[in-house]
Image (cartoon, rainbow, N blue to C red):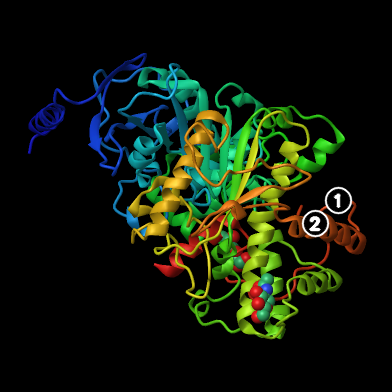
Amino acid sequence: MDHLYFYTVLFFTAVLFANSQDPRISSKLGEIVGKIKSVPIEGLPYQNVHEYLGIPFAKPPVGELRFRKPEPMTSLPSPFYAQSHGAICPQITMTPVDVEAEQSEDCLFLNVYVPDRPADKPTGHAVMVWIYGGGFVEGASNFYDCSTLSIAGNIIVVTINYRLNVFGFLNTGDENARGNFGLWDQHSALQWVHDNIGDFGGDNQRVTIAGESAGAMSVMTQAITPGNRGLFQRAIAQSGSMSMPVLDFERDGLKDTITLAGSLGCETDSMVDLMRCLREKSVDEYLTAVYSLLSNVSYSPVLDNDFIKVNPRYIAKMSEIRSLDEIEFFRSVDILSGFNAFEGALFLPFIMDPTKIENMQPTRQEMKRQYLPAAMNMLYRTGFADEIMNLVEAHYTNWSNPDDFHSIRLQITKLLGDASFGVPAVEMARLHKISSASRNFMYHFAPKPSVRLLPTPTWIPGSNHADEIGFIFGSPNLGVGDGNAWETDLIIKMITYWTNFIKSGDPNSPESVTPSWPEYSIDNGDYLVLDKSMSDESAKQHFYAEEANFWLEIFPDLVEAVQGDGKGGCGDGTFTSSAPNVPVYGSVSFITAVILTFVSFF
Ligand SMILES: *[C@@H]1O[C@H](CO)[C@@H](O)[C@H](O)[C@H]1NC(C)=O
Ligand SMILES: *[C@@H]1O[C@H](CO)[C@@H](O)[C@H](O)[C@H]1NC(C)=O
């Protein structure tokens, strides 16, 4: 087939697919043609969503632009046919649903879902921008079908891609490559939304950023970045915070870059030459190299003194000492956050042989000698003195049933979940509410759904990591498959709470929903339990008070007293105590953990 013929066919196909009913937007960037999707929802008179898919928001970050901040896209070919998704960013593994998607380094696309129904306010539709999770090494906007959420909740939803893994986070610790390119991509997409969403009928004064897992870590990181002032007013963080101990903002990026360069044949004494060589390698060469170096290199956000100027791990402590612009901005944003009942299960595959998890029957000795040290080592990248380990063990022993393997394995799961997701979320809610006129709401998502998104041992009695996502999007490919009555009810409630918050900053209005969700306060620790059946009893108090006291007060004070390194906290990677000699089935990095989670199951 000669090229002219090929392109002619492509051209006519595009024109034929675009018909006169297709929704069209005239924007500052040019004319954008979308498509209509019908989402019949029982009882809802509105059914159509206008989808604008695969819109590039930045120049392709390839060639000279690889390992640099994104450059904005100032115009599009007009008309631009935004009728199918763009490529997803290069990644090693992907959840099974999306394995087929095309990968390309040219991946900075976003998708806009506009409900075909009147906005709740004359200023236009409230907007949610969804930032995907996946440990900063995988994920794709294409994976999230937002049509149900958009039409049922009557909001505009935007999903964005951002660079992942080495392409998103390679860094040299200096101006050669500062890292955090993936976070800059998110920022650039938020700027695009601010500048252009009005053309789609959106209200750029009512923008909420939302995400899950690494998406929530991203959301919280964007929410402490003063350069985002004016780009969004609210933030939703589902199971992720920038203060999670597994995130290592001070890791040695230069060392990783040199290791990687060695494996790509780019070793040289000149950093300029090294970067030039790195810009010439193909995507396949990178993915092969990164895969073979899984336990040697890791890619995630770093303290670069540009995008991130204060280590988010210690931002709560630092804000006690001096006022920070980061915290001032953080406190101007309304926040809704929470986590799931048993999501420590996400981390089980790398404190033990993944094939043994389903049938694990741990004894107390194994808990003490094997699982506990492996868990602490994974979370904090360091070992701890015996006095400290004994305290943690005592705290995570179920004293009404200390030798029962059922309770031991649940306690291990709880420790992993508490220290990684639960306590940091509460820590950030407190930091937000200490002095803040803006609003804060917390949830605990509890139930065991009929379909899991992630591989989960059958003995986990409630929600694992990511199990709540399907309830927000009301979408079967995201885990809610069987359509049980309680699941449908909970989907409707959660979509209403979420989109109310997105519209007004309050999950309880403008649409009515019960029970009422009380606002978080430092004194009462109010929160809402999202579960199979809900009543006024679902609103509870003192959320994670005991766990937060243990991990934020008792544990670091004991570490300070016993290991006395003057850091007044744990997990900055400088402890002198040597790591115990325990088998660790994964590596110390969060990224590796996520990859191994998928690789080991699929
Ligand atoms: C990767 O790490 C392993 C274990 O620490 C080490 O044996 C190996 O030499 C490292 N490989 C490279 C290329 O640095
Ligand atoms: C502790 O064990 C008892 C008895 O098996 C059980 O009823 C209880 O739920 C357990 N507590 C926790 C926190 O798992």
Is residue 94 something that shows in the picture? no
Query: What residue is drawn where x is 71% and y is 28%?
Result: 437
Front one among 557 and 474: 474
Residues at marks 1 and 2, CA–CA distance in whole angstroms: 19 Å
Front one among 97 and 551: 551
Per the image, the residue denoted by label 2 is 549
Within 10 Å of disc 1 (Cα), the crowding (few <14, some 14-19, many 20+) is: some
Q: Position of residue 594 (x, y in %)?
A: 52, 59
Which mark, by number, is residue 567?
Answer: 1
Marks 1 and 2 close (CB-CB < 8 Å): no
Among numbered discs 1 and 2, the one appearing first in the sequence: 2
Mark in front: 1 vs 2: 2
* Residue 272, quarter of the rendered image: top right
Tell which quarter ligand 2 is in: bottom right
Q: Position of residue 419 (x, y in %)?
A: 69, 59
Which mark, by number, is residue 134?
Answer: none
In the image, residue 110 sits, relative to residue 468, either above or below, namely above
| Residue type indicated by callout 2 | Asn
In the image, residue 559 sits, relative to residue 495, either above or below, namely below
Q: Position of residue 519 (x, y in %)?
A: 66, 40
Q: Position of residue 501 (x, y in %)?
A: 53, 35
Q: Is mark 2 within 8 Å of ligand 2?
A: no
Label 1 residue SS: loop
Indicate left or right for 406 with 483 as reference.
right
Front one among 54 and 579: 54
Query: What residue is drawn where x is 72% and y is 82%?
Result: 402
Report the quarter where the N terminus lies: top left
Report the quarter where the C terminus lies: bottom left
In the image, residue 581 sits, relative to residue 376, either above or below, namely below
| Residue type indicated by callout 1 | Lys
Query: What residue is drawn where x is 27% and y is 29%?
Result: 82
